[in-house]
Image (tube, rainbow, N blue to C red):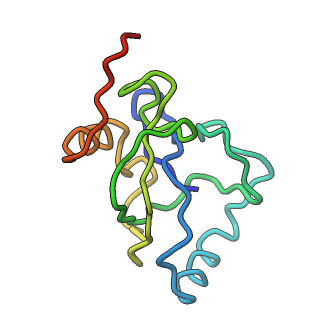
Amino acid sequence: MLAAYDDETDTFPSICKVGTGFKDEDLDQLYQLLQDKVILKKNPRINSEMEADVWFEPELVLEIVASEITLSPIHKTAMDVVRKNSGLALRFPKFTGKIRLEKTPEDASTTEEVTALYKGQKKVVQDTKQF
């Protein structure tokens, strides 16, 4: 599971689960980087209702590509910003092979940046419902 960064709440709301694009070398490197970051339960800064087999401290920034950004009832990035009870999620996310070691978790894409990217897409669901 990956997350964006919400600088207003200093939290990491979930944005996708990714399982494609990883080479064996990438998985080995991720293991080496994260083996000492395992925690017993979800960090309170992680905003997600999803359960994980293993939780890590927010630590790494991974570069991901996706076909589009969609509304999601599950993921928490920009929850209620575009549509009530919906967050934003990456559709068909894929790891590019780049682990951005020069960045901190707080340097990840922010919820505001993800919202702007969503609104800049050619295909955007416009919500006519009032909150």
Residue at the image position 44 percent from the left and 24 percent from the top: 80
Q: Is residue 108 left or right of residue 28?
A: left
From the viewer's perspective, is 107 left or right of 34? left
Residue drawn at (46%, 35%) of the image: 87
Report the front residue among 13 and 58: 13
| Residue beneath the point at 33% across and 24% down | 127
**Which is nearer the eye, 25 or 74?**
74
**Residue most toward the top?**
131
User: Which residue is depicted at the point 31% across and 18% down?
Assistant: 128
- Residue 38 image position (x, y, % from top left): 72, 60
The residue sitting at the right extreme is 40
Q: Is residue 37 above or below residue 30?
A: above
Q: Quadrant of residue 47?
A: top right
Residue 113 horizontal/vertical position (percent): 28, 42
Number of marks in the image?
0
Residue 103 lies left or right of residue 54; in this view the side is left
The quadrant of the image that shows the C terminus is top left
x and y, in percent, of residue 1 in the image: 58, 56
Residue 9: horizontal and vertical position, in percent? 47, 28
Q: As displayed, is residue 121 above or below residue 18?
A: above
